[in-house]
């Protein structure tokens, strides 16, 4: 098999997985954006809480820091959950994925820009070549 053919198969195999992960993250950003815009209309977002055992470890530190800052450490010591609004906001901004989650979203944004601009270019290039 020719070298360029092997290269094409190699790149295509990885690009479809990268595209799949990118689409899932874009859908997550879109849904959480809609929820953040309508958070005042949806009572669930205002009242529901998410247990800490379902979330990454850095949420325990964040909850403890918030309690200390507000002076409510003794009052809510037994409560082991965070507001749903926190989780939605963190998913939207990338903080859910830890300290470097914003870099993941930056890469995703650059990929979306590249895909969008190449898509527009290809659309007009193909349209120009077709004669009706």
Image (cartoon, grey):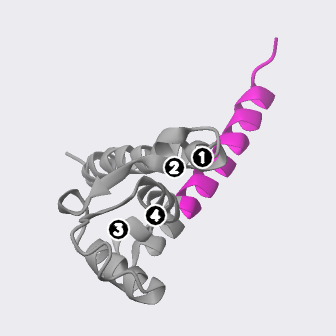
The image shows residue 72 at horizontal and vertical percentages of 39, 80
**Distance from the alpha carbon under mark 4 to that under mark 3:** 8 Å
Q: Which residues are magenta?
A: 109-132
Q: Regarding mark 2 in the picture, which secondary structure is present there?
A: helix
The image shows residue 54 at horizontal and vertical percentages of 21, 56
N-terminal-most mark, 4 or 3: 4
Closer to the eye: label 1 or 2: 2
Q: Is residue 130 visible?
A: yes
Closer to the eye: label 4 or 3: 4
Contact between marks 1 and 2 (CB within 8 A): the answer is: yes
Q: Quadrant of the N terminus?
A: top left
Contact between marks 3 and 1 (CB within 8 A): the answer is: no
**Distance from the alpha carbon under mark 1 to that under mark 4:** 14 Å
- Crowding around mark 3 (Cα neighbors within 10 Å: few <14, some 14 to 19, many 20+) is some
List the residue tagged with mark 2. 46
43 and 118: which is toward the camera = 43
Q: Quadrant of the C terminus?
A: top right
- Crowding around mark 1 (Cα neighbors within 10 Å: few <14, some 14 to 19, many 20+) is some
**Distance from the alpha carbon under mark 3 to that under mark 2:** 23 Å
Q: Which residue does the image show at 36% across and 79% down from the upper left?
A: 62
Q: Which residue does the image show at 53% across and 58% down from the upper left?
A: 111
Residue 129: which numbered mark, if any?
none
N-terminal-most mark, 1 or 2: 1
List the residue tagged with mark 4. 90
List the residue tagged with mark 3. 97
List the residue tagged with mark 1. 39
The residue most toward the front is: 75
**Distance from the alpha carbon under mark 3 to that under mark 1:** 22 Å
Q: Is residue 99 visible?
A: no
Q: Which residue does the image show at 42% across and 86% down from the upper left?
A: 71
């Amino acid at each position: 098999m020719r070298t360029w053919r092997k290269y094409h198969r190699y790149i295509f195999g990885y690009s479809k997985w990268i595209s799949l992960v990118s689409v899932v993250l874009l859908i997550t950003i879109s849904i959480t954006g809609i929820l953040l815009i309508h958070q005042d209309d949806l009572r669930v977002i205002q009242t529901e809480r998410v247990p800490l055992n379902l979330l990454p470890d850095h949420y325990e530190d964040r909850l403890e820091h918030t309690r200390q800052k507000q002076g409510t450490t003794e009052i809510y010591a037994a409560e082991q959950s965070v507001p749903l609004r926190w989780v939605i906001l963190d998913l939207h901004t990338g903080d859910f994925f830890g300290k470097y989650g914003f870099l993941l979203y930056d890469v995703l944004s650059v990929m979306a820009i590249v895909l969008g601009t190449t898509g527009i270019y290809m659309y007009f290039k193909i349209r120009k070549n077709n004669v009706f």
